[in-house]
Amino acid sequence: MKPTIYDVAKEAGVSIATVSKVLNNTGRISEKTRKKVLEIINRMDYHPSGVAAALTGKKTFTIGVLVPDIANTFFAEVARALENKAREMGYAIILCATDYKSEREREYLDLLLKKQVDGVIMATEPNDLEPFRKLSERQVPLLLFSVDQLSVASNVVTTDNVRGGYIAGQYLVKKGHRRLGMIVERKRQSGRARLSGFQQALAEEGIDLEERFIIDTRSTITEARQAAQHLLSLDEKPTAVFTANDLIAVILINEARKAGLRIPEDLSVIGFDNTIHAEIVDPGLTTIAQPIEELASYAFHQLLQSIERSTMAGHRIMLSPELIERASVLDLSNTK
């Protein structure tokens, strides 16, 4: 059994109140007693209960993190970056993957409230607003990561997704592509923003993104594969495709190869995120990079500020994406 504060007090021959004062560095206690209690705490490997600390109004030094799918490398890399930042700041994270299910999202938020987390970072689309009212009522700070939802009061740290889509469109047009497609996540605000930026870039060049070349999906392997197969089954295919993220891009490349197409000679592909997928796929994936480490750093900094000052107004931080050029896009400009 795990040792309790009662066990520590009994072993040290002091009161529970004295052990509590040593743990919280409060009250008048002799240095001899303090050292004795700390030595026993270390020897017994005693760890105070986070819930008990929360009930006394103290921090638990835990942060809840909700992501839609940990199998998506972007969210895996985000989770790693947030955990590294948390450890650096003396915090731990509780990672919850919702699998795009609203019911699971509600269950996890209830769990995080029961765990008395100091704050929540959420990278899922908040569809049901009731759990967020609970967070607000209990004054648990919330930060939306790579999500921008105006109906939820929170800090926001995200990438300029419209700009990212625009850069992708501009790049493909510059490379001489005119028949273009996109595999998009329309259910995510970030996906709609990337589509909007992509369409803007094409419109400036007098190019219409035909609806038949816009394929909607979610970032699961199964659904992304179905979307790729649907696009590749079209009688007339685009010469280049912009995908909502690198996971979808890699799946599209794999499905295109199965269909006997060469990348980029027969089909050019550009992704979004610049995850490890983009580096290890063959050919290397040209993609729009999100500054994941910077996003995680800003996110943790903003959330900690809200934890320290609960009355602080929410801030919205938007970072700029950049193009990372590799070998998955064919240059057609010299053949026109």
Image (spheres, grey):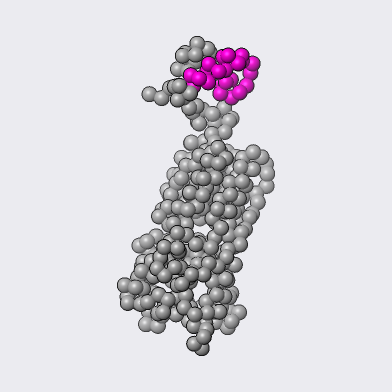
| Residue at the extreme top | 13
Task: For the N terminus, give its image quadrant.
Answer: top left
Question: Which secondary structure dominates the residues rendered in magenta?
Answer: helix
- Residue 115, given in percent of the width and then of the height, sits at 48, 36
Quadrant of the rendered image containing residue 2 = top left
Q: Residue at x 37, y 61 (%)?
A: 221
Magenta span includes 256: no
Residue under the image location 58 percent in, 79 percent down: 203
Q: Is residue 37 magenta?
A: yes
- Given residues 334 and 275, the one toward you in this image is 334
The residue segment tinted magenta is 20-41
Q: Position of residue 62 (x, y in %)?
A: 52, 38
Rendering coords of residue 217 (x, y %): 42, 65
* Residue 120 in sight: no
Farthest-out residue, bottom? 336
Residue 77 percent location from the top left of the image: 47, 53
On screen, 77 above or below 280?
above
Front one among 140 and 320: 320
Residue found 55% across the figure and 53% down from its top:
293
Q: Which residue is depicted at the point 47% across and 57% down?
A: 74
Asked whether 126 or 269 is in front, the reply is 269
Judge whether residue 42 can be spotted in this image. yes
* In the image, residue 33 above or below residue 130: above
